[in-house]
Image (cartoon, rainbow, N blue to C red):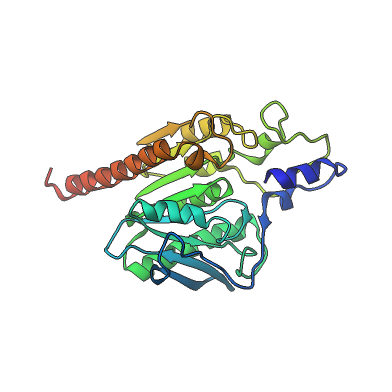
Amino acid sequence: MRSQALILLLAPGCISLDAFVYNPEKLDQYSLSGDVIPGSQIELVSFSSEDLTLYGAWARQTEPAPVIVHFHGNDGNIDVHWDRVETYWSWGYDVFIFDYRGYGRSEGEPSLEGLEADGLAAVETVSNSLGVESRDLHYVGLSLGGAVAIRTARDLPPLSLTSEDTFADLDLLLDSSASDLRLGAGWFFNEDWDNVAAMREVEDVPTFVIHAAEDKFVPTVSGDRLYAAAPDPKQKWHPPGADHADSYTVLPDQYRQRLTDWLDFATAHRAAESLEESGLR
């Protein structure tokens, strides 16, 4: 996102910034590196979202494992974000990642309504593939992916929701006092990515808000606003010394401990709720 911001700084004002939200990279073929995950445990799949064909990929364990659906950030494609898949897989999770419309090999052009539909379609694909409900899946969303994950959680509630370095709303990115994206008058957004409002509509989902303490692109106050709007139970973490989207590489041990502890907590919380609902507790 930052490289594209530098280009935008050189352009005149009075221009819509909607295209700035999306930075897709098209591909004819995915590489899906097998350096960490054996190739036999990687599966490329296609699925439908509205009238478009999208692509996703599984990284599976050899034995049944908890499932993370990863909603990647605004740039690139599955290949660009494959190191995240490798990280979560190395912790013992099955991971499903997918390309939104217009990204990688997925058809179409990105838009707010389109990405909302894509998130729902991806989760339905995972649910149907495994024969489970959305309540059995963990959603982990990075940056723009956090915004898609929040909206998906609103309509298909998961076992847990994690948003990382996600913007509260697009107007905050134009606030020169809060972000390194400094633009003069005349810039505007047509699409309303109000993620705080979307978060308020998420119900009964354990929510973890991660936001890098030194994020120079999406101001850390975004994380605070999303946390305030999130349902209980919830937790917030500002990884010290980390910038946008690099907490897992700057603080790998802490990142793993914090996130896996949260996913374990959410699983235990769900089990306790099920016991209460069945009258066994």
Q: Is residue 5 left or right of residue 13?
A: left
Point 61% across, 32% down: residue = 219
Q: Foreground: 124 or 105?
A: 105
Dividing the image into 4 quarters, which one contains the C terminus?
A: top left
Whether residue 13 is visible, yes or no, is yes
Q: Is residue 117 left or right of residue 217?
A: left
Whether residue 155 is visible, yes or no, is no
Residue farthest toward the top in the current orientation of the protein: 177
Point 46% across, 62% down: residue = 35
Q: Is residue 278 above or below residue 97?
A: above
Q: Foreground: 121 or 73?
A: 73
Q: Foreground: 255 or 261?
A: 255
Residue farthest toward the right in the current orientation of the protein: 12
Picture quadrant where residue 132 is located: bottom left
The percent coordinates of residue 153 (x first, y second) are: 44, 51
Q: Is residue 133 left or right of residue 195?
A: left
Point 54% across, 41% down: residue = 246
The percent coordinates of residue 267 (x first, y second) are: 28, 47
Picture quadrant where residue 108 is located: bottom right
Point 54% across, 52% down: residue = 148
